Image (cartoon, helix red, strand yellow):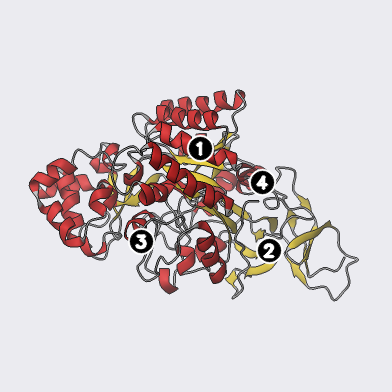
Amino acid sequence: MSLDLIITGGTVVDGTGGPARLADVGIAGDRIAEVGQLDDAPPATPRLEVDGLIVAPGFIDVHSHSDFTLLRDPRAVSSIAQGVTTEVVGNCGFGCAPLAPPHLAQLNIYGFSPDLPLDWQGMAGYYARLEAVRPAVNVAVLVPNGQLRLAVVGAENRPATADERDRMGALLDEALEEGGWGFSTGLEYGPEVGATEEEVTTLCHHTARHGGLYSTHTRNRDEAAVEAIAEAIRSAETAGTRLQISHITPRGGHDDLARALDLVDEAAARGQPVSFDMHTRLFGTTYLKIVLPAEVLIMEKAEMARTLADPAARARLKEFRSLISAVGDWDRIVLLDNPGLPDLSRRSIGEIARERGVEPLDCVYDILLAEIDQLHRPMVILKTYTEELLSHTYRHPRCVPASDATALAPDGPLAGSSFHGAYTWASWFFRRMVRETGTFTLEEGIHMLTGRPAEQMGITDRGRLAPKFKADLAVFDAETFAERGTTFEPNQMAVGMWHLLVNGVLSLTDGALTERRGGQVLRRR
């Protein structure tokens, strides 16, 4: 067979969990052609010498929010620099297809900017837009429940009627027929708080008929986190669909985590296909604006400002339970750097509220009022996890690590954006869980970043380094691969990733980005 490239001298870790071995890798077109000793290949065949480096399948991020940022900057620099070759977007009920009217849809898109108009509607239109920009990574898309509800129910916090469930089901059917990989919910977020278990189960039935996956950010991750996971399992089992539980670790600590994992094991023992992911941060991160219900978020700026300034309206708003207010300890809610509020950056809401002599939610409303023209800017971290909790979660055989972030770049249209995990998730996991603590062997750690997520998603031609698989390959130094981003300086490139191929295209070479982008839009067949 004629080869386009031979990667020679490296240690192959094939993504199955099997032992590492010295081997060459031959690439033909967008696929792996041969793995072994390729000394007999024609001398003119281009060779990439990688002595002392690991050659592995490209990493798969099953929980990404890059739906929109890939349209704004398709280079996916933060991902490429960490060896990521495939991202699954549309998670947590957020995403870009199908779209409600644009003024509603934009509420449910991470990284939204009015610079890029929402001029498509269905999944086919979104796929076409992705293909037009030629992303550097492969992209698989889930159908977000938040957009289904905004399109049919609107911003009302109530259960859908039977007719509305039918209409949402039809939209979901269409998106799955056009190549969506499954259905996702974000039941802690404003547009979906009113969704009932019956409603979600109905949509899971539609998903099952198409062979799709149900991925869920569960209804509650605090005091009722275990029951929320039980609800997700009931919906998936009743409908007969595969289940992926997003960032499963409850915020309540070890007892809740043990009970949650027991529920997963019990469901698996009954034959329910269930798996889960967990991000690699010791905190959650989100927009401060999610303390507001959807009906407020859709208001015109002037009306929203009047509402936030009105004491009677504030009293009503305080009854809304959000992901942020549910934490219950405002000293654990910390504002990230914000150019509009430099004196408040890196301080907790509890501290700021005490300094001002106001209730914490009043403090939050004051901050949102001050940022009414750029409500997407104030972001917070929720200090809710320990490394021990994360490690315990990762050790479960049905777990994979994931970013729970958007692909970013330190220059270009996304230079001013940040999202914790974007530059650090895979590199932190490898540095800390594989190299430093030895929680996983080299082979186990790479399996968790490659073969296992491919199996969970049902991606059959990636995640493994073997002939006929797609040539998505990460070549890195196992002794130096690490993150550099920190809590308050997150936008720093990972180090130690030397070469990256996406469908046979060298997107990173000698640690530097090339001008070539080889990603593909993956349609579920």
Between tags 4 and 3, which lies in front?
Answer: 3
Query: Residue at the front extreme?
Result: 163
Look at label 1 and name its amino acid: Cys
Q: CA distance from mark 4 to mark 3?
A: 37 Å
124 or 294: nearer the eye?
Answer: 124
Between tags 2 and 3, which lies in front?
Answer: 3
Q: CA distance from mark 1 to mark 3?
A: 26 Å
Residue 24 picture quarter: bottom right
Residue of label 3 = 102
How many labels sit on residues? 4
Between tags 2 and 1, which lies in front?
Answer: 1
Which circle's residue, 2 or 4, is located before the other in the chain? Answer: 4
Q: Are marks 2 and 4 in contact (CB under 8 Å)?
A: no
Which circle's residue, 1 or 4, is located before the other in the chain? Answer: 1
Q: Position of residue 464 (x, y in %)?
A: 71, 50
User: For the residue labelled by badge 1, is the local secondary structure a helix, a strand or a loop?
Assistant: helix
Look at label 2 and name its amino acid: Asn
Which circle's residue, 2 or 1, is located before the other in the chain? Answer: 1
395 or 483: nearer the eye?
Answer: 395
Horizontal side of residue 102 vs 397, given as left or right: left
Residue of label 1 = 204
For the point 55% across and 55% down, the residue is 87
- For residue 503, which numbered disc appears in the image? 2
Horizontal side of residue 503 vs 154, given as left or right: right
Which circle's residue, 1 or 3, is located before the other in the chain? Answer: 3
Q: Is residue 497 above or below residue 238?
A: below
Q: Are marks 2 and 1 in contact (CB under 8 Å)?
A: no
Residue of label 4 = 451
User: For the residue labelled by badge 2, is the local secondary structure a helix, a strand or a loop?
Assistant: loop
